[in-house]
């Protein structure tokens, strides 16, 4: 079993739609849960970061962590064409090594 | 403030040749990381420096890869000799503090193609 599972997509939605991105993980030692956004030919940039189970909201983005189910989600409300990118879930046990999912490619059509 | 920079942006070499990738972290960031993404796979950790010291190089694929960070500033990653399976995008990241709570800032990556 892979340590992190993430559907690579691609996921195509119309502008204004609510987008749901998900990852499952198997390592119970993960303490930090992150979502990175990566535009084409660019490096990943940190989008959302959570430490505990529950929800965290930042503008149009909501990150959700369910430790009991080992499942994390990222919701994007009122999606925009500029949200078109690859979204990577990422995990950390509290050390220096970050474990990434394979990334989901998102296309938001105008 | 300048971000993490990497050079070159793209390198195409023949199998058996040597390539050196360079990373300049954000000024003042003691922690520097190298990651690699092979086609179709996830980004994987290669190694971590704190200043000039290697803290963890458990992700380095084999002894054909050598990373250095002289003086605790920029870092180089040398692949010698390069093999076909080394093709991919090599990312460098830096952070101010150590640990999962600290944001790692990524460079744009170096795309390495080995023919």
Image (cartoon, grey):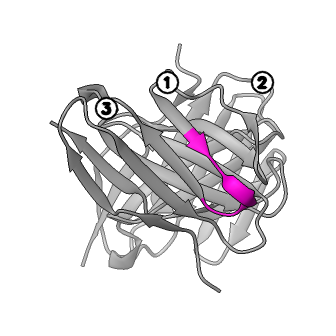
Circle 2 sits on which residue?
Answer: A28
Relative to A29, residue B10 above or below: below
Tell me the SS state at disc 2: loop
Q: Judge from the rendering whether residue A66 lies leftward or rightward of residue A31; answer left or right.
A: left
Residue sitting at x 84%, y 40%: A94
Crowding around mark 2 (Cα neighbors within 10 Å: few <14, some 14 to 19, many 20+) is: few
Tell me the SS state at disc 3: loop
Q: Answer with the quarter of the image where residue A83 lies.
A: bottom left
Q: Answer with the quarter of the image where residue A75 lies.
A: bottom right
Residue sitting at x 42%, y 73%: A79
In this rendering, the label closer to the viewer, 2 or 3:
3
Let me know if marks 2 and 3 both belong to one chain: no
Is residue B71 within the magenta segment? yes
Cα distance in 3D space between marks 2 and 1:
26 Å
Tell me the SS state at disc 1: loop
Nearest the viewer among A24 and B27 is B27
Residue A50 location, x and y as percent? Answer: 77, 54
Circle 1 sits on which residue?
Answer: B61
Q: Judge from the rendering whether residue B97 lies leftward or rightward of residue A14; answer left or right.
A: right
Residue A96 location, x and y as percent? Answer: 76, 42
Q: Which residues are magenta?
A: B67-74
Relative to B29, residue B77 above or below: above
């Amino acid at each position: 079993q892979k340590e992190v599972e993430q559907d690579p997509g691609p996921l195509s939605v119309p502008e204004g739609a609510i987008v749901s991105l998900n990852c499952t993980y198997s390592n119970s030692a993960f303490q930090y849960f992150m979502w990175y956004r990566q535009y084409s030919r660019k490096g990943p940039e940190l989008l959302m970061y959570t430490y505990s189970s529950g929800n965290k909201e930042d503008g149009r983005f909501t990150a959700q962590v369910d430790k009991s189910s080992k499942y994390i989600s990222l919701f994007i409300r009122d999606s925009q064409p500029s949200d078109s990118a690859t979204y990577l879930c990422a995990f950390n046990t509290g050390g220096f090594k970050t474990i990434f999912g394979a990334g989901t490619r998102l296309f938001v059509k105008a | 403030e300048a971000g993490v920079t990497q050079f070159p942006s793209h390198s195409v070499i023949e199998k058996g040749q040597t390539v050196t990738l360079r990373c300049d972290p954000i000024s003042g960031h003691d922690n520097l990381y190298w990651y690699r993404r092979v086609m179709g796979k996830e980004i994987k950790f290669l190694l971590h420096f704190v200043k000039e010291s290697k803290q963890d190089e458990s992700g380095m694929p084999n002894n054909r890869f050598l990373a250095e960070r002289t003086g605790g500033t920029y870092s180089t990653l040398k692949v010698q000799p390069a093999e076909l399976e080394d093709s991919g995008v090599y990312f460098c990241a830096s952070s101010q503090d150590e640990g999962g709570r600290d944001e790692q800032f990524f460079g744009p990556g170096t795309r390495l193609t080995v023919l």
